[in-house]
């Protein structure tokens, strides 16, 4: 059945496009009246009116010429006023149906629908705009058709009920939203402000009475506080705008989320596209018992464009995050095995060398450029006693655990990441040993997964495990990958499994 | 475990020589511009680069191993960082064999194995004879299809 866009999209599109036109018209009007007098005003008015009519006409024609239809297995779209375009997108290839509504669209009750397909880096098709109910219907219908595709044998009604069974997994409470805001710190802003403020320092120092070093130091401190405050406020604002009224629910084989204060997003993440789960926290969140969860999918990270992060759950109680992650991928509760204790000595050495390098560079720079501060250049060396502590913390927060169906790794103290990778998602297993790692008899084993090569979701890495463990780990990962994949694809049990050696040695 | 064709050493040593020459030229320019640098610096720098480059190239050849196992491709390589990679055949997206201009000069070819992993086209097996590269490509392709073929069951 062929459908058209919402008629309310015409005024919206006219206003959206007409904004620029209005500005141009205003300039035309004022310049014309300046040059030609009242007659010019008339001409300009007529011209502007004509352009407005043209625009309205175009948008009406666009609306009339735009038709889409959901057939059994394709989404057909015909569009274009002058150049006609006709597309058929196989439903099976549609990964996500994302709905977004800004504040004007919400007032008009319309929404933009984006259809994402796998592989493509950009949106495959966009409907601007349909009514919100229609958008939700499309989302539902596509999910239902996909579920039907995946399981053709079962009766239609059966899949329909199974697919529409919605359970809410998570809703962000007001208090948690406030916490998300409070804990968000936009790191891009300090850089910008730093550039801006260092430009202001000469001005400041010329205003302030010169003589002692003190005013400059005070100004610097004030600037630092201001920068911190502004970045914190900006981060908090963005976080609140992004995650206001965040809800995540499971509908059939998909996760659906809703979020946003001014602009509302309704998106879906197909469960069978989930590659990794990453639970992140930092010392502050750990202290208060909170954590975040990211869901990594292949190729497409929901919300990556707008929010700059693929966080699925921005913040929640630690236990709740683990419970939730377990509902998406039931991996159990991992008991991590830490790297051998000798790596603590390695980290101590590493931090000391880094500290020495920083001090050396500082000292060298002070010889060339001079040193404006009252303390000596070797001051960073007072941090040296902290190196063993830092090394211990780094060691403490590393670990790897092999579950029945998942490999889970843990890394990082300040930004701790717990990465969960199902065995059947493993793409390659990589065992790498640097010169230094070989000296300490340790290795890094990475279970690489498909997916966006973002910094956070690059598969699970067991860093600095003993070489003997690395050998077993590699074999176990490979064996379990095969059995898991065989089991998942229903190849039968001809693979003898279970014999995989455990790694607790 | 298979090793690479010994002729790949010619290729890698040749590359090291070219790099050494470039480094030497840069050092020579610097010597000409700055008076404080003694005249023999470019020679020493180039020689150093040559020695390091050639020994790394030879070590790389000595350490490179690959093996087509029952259900995975196994690679071992790296001089400073030793890397062992296991690529299950099911995960192979496609296989290329390629011959760069320098490779053609010494009569060699490479096989590139692509997976969907985030480290994408990381898996290149250099230093194969052209026939060997084509054979390996065909063999990997068949193995990948066979592994994936069981999928349909």
Image: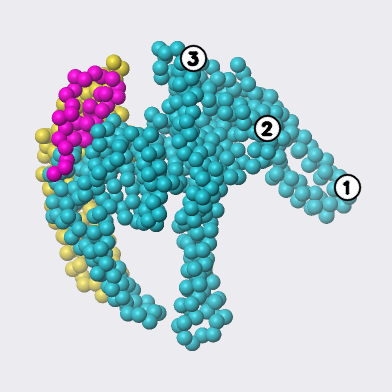
Chain colours: A cyan, B yellow
Q: Residue at x 48, y 77 (%)?
A: A218
Separation of residues labelled 1 and 2 (CA atoms): 36 Å
Chain of the residue under the numbered disc 2 shown in the image:
A
- Where residue A424 sits: x, y (%)? 28, 30
As displayed, is residue A171 above or below residue A30?
above
Identify the residue at the far bottom of this view: A211
Do labels 1 and 2 touch, CB within 8 Å? no
Q: Residue at x 20, y 33 (%)?
A: A478
- Where residue B20 sits: x, y (%)? 21, 56
- Labels 1, 3: front one: 3
Which residue is label 3 attached to? A157
Chain of the residue under the numbered disc 3 shown in the image:
A
Which residue is label 1 attached to? A39
Separation of residues labelled 1 and 3 (CA atoms): 70 Å
Identify the residue at the far right of this view: A38
Query: Which class describes the residues within 10 Å of circle 1: few (<14), some (14-19), or many (20+)?
Result: few
Q: Residue A9: give its label.
A: 2
Left or right, residue A57 beside residue A415: right
Pointer 3 and pointer 2 on the same chain: yes
Range of residues picked out in magenta? A476-505
Figure quadrant of residue A11: top right
């Amino acid at each position: 059945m062929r459908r058209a866009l919402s008629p309310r999209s015409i005024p919206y599109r006219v206003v959206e496009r007409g904004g620029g036109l209005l500005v141009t018209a205003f300039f035309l009007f004022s310049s014309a009246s300046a040059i030609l007098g009242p007659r010019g005003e008339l001409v300009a008015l007529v011209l502007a009116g004509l352009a407005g009519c043209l625009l309205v006409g175009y948008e009406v024609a666009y609306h009339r010429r735009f038709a889409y239809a959901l057939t059994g297995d394709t989404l057909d779209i015909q569009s274009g006023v002058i150049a006609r375009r006709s597309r058929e997108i196989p439903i099976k290839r549609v990964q996500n149906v994302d709905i977004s509504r800004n504040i004007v669209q919400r007032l008009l009750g319309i929404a933009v629908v984006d259809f994402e397909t796998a592989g493509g880096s950009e949106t495959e098709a966009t409907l601007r705009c349909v009514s919100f109910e229609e958008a939700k219907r499309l989302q539902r219908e596509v999910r239902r058709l996909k579920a039907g595709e995946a399981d053709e044998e079962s009766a239609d009604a059966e899949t329909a009920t199974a697919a529409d069974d919605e359970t809410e997994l998570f809703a962000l409470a007001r208090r948690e939203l406030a916490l998300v805001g409070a804990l968000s710190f936009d790191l891009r802003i300090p850089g910008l402000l730093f550039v801006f403020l260092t430009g202001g320092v000469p001005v400041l120092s010329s205003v302030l009475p010169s003589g002692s070093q003190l005013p400059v130091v005070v100004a610097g401190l004030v600037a630092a506080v201001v920068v911190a405050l502004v970045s914190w406020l900006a981060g908090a604002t963005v976080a609140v705008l992004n995650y206001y009224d965040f809800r995540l629910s499971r509908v059939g084989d998909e996760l659906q989320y809703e979020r946003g204060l001014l602009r509302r997003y309704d998106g879906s993440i197909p469960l069978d596209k989930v590659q990794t789960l990453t639970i992140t926290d930092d010392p502050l969140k750990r202290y208060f018992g909170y954590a975040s969860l990211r869901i990594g999918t292949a190729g497409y990270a929901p919300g990556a464009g707008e929010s700059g992060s693929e966080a699925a759950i921005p913040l929640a109680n630690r236990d709740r995050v683990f419970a939730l992650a377990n509902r998406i991928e039931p991996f159990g509760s991992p008991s991590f095995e830490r790297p051998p204790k000798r790596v603590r000595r390695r980290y101590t050495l590493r931090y000391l060398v880094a500290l020495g390098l920083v001090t050396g560079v500082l000292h060298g720079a002070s010889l060339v450029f001079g040193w404006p501060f009252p303390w000596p250049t070797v001051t960073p060396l007072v941090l040296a006693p902290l190196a063993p502590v830092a090394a211990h913390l780094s060691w403490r927060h590393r670990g790897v655990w092999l579950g029945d169906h998942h490999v889970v790794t843990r890394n990082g103290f300040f930004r701790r990441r717990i990465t969960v990778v199902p065995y059947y998602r493993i793409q390659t297993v990589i065992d790498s040993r640097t010169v230094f790692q070989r000296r300490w008899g340790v290795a890094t084993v990475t279970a690489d997964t498909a997916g966006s090569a973002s910094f956070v979701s690059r598969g699970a890495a067991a860093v600095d495990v003993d070489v003997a463990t690395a050998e077993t780990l590699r074999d176990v990962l490979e064996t379990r990958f095969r059995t898991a994949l065989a089991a998942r694809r229903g190849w039968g049990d001809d693979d003898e499994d279970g014999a995989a050696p455990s790694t607790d040695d | 475990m298979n090793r690479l064709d010994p002729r790949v050493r010619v290729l890698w040593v040749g590359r090291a020589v070219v790099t050494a020459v470039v480094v030497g030229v840069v050092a020579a320019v610097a010597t000409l511009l700055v008076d404080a640098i003694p005249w023999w610096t470019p020679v020493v720098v180039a020689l150093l680069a040559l020695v390091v480059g050639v020994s790394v190239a030879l070590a790389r050849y000595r350490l490179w191993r690959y093996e087509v196992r029952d259900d995975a491709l196994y690679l071992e390589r790296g001089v400073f960082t030793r890397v062992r990679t296991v690529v299950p055949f099911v995960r192979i997206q496609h296989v290329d064999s390629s011959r760069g201009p320098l490779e053609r000069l010494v009569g060699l070819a490479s096989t590139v194995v692509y997976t969907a992993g985030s480290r994408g086209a990381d898996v290149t097996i250099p230093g194969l004879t052209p026939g060997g590269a084509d054979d390996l490509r065909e063999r990997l392709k068949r193995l990948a299809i066979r592994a994936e073929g069981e999928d349909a069951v």
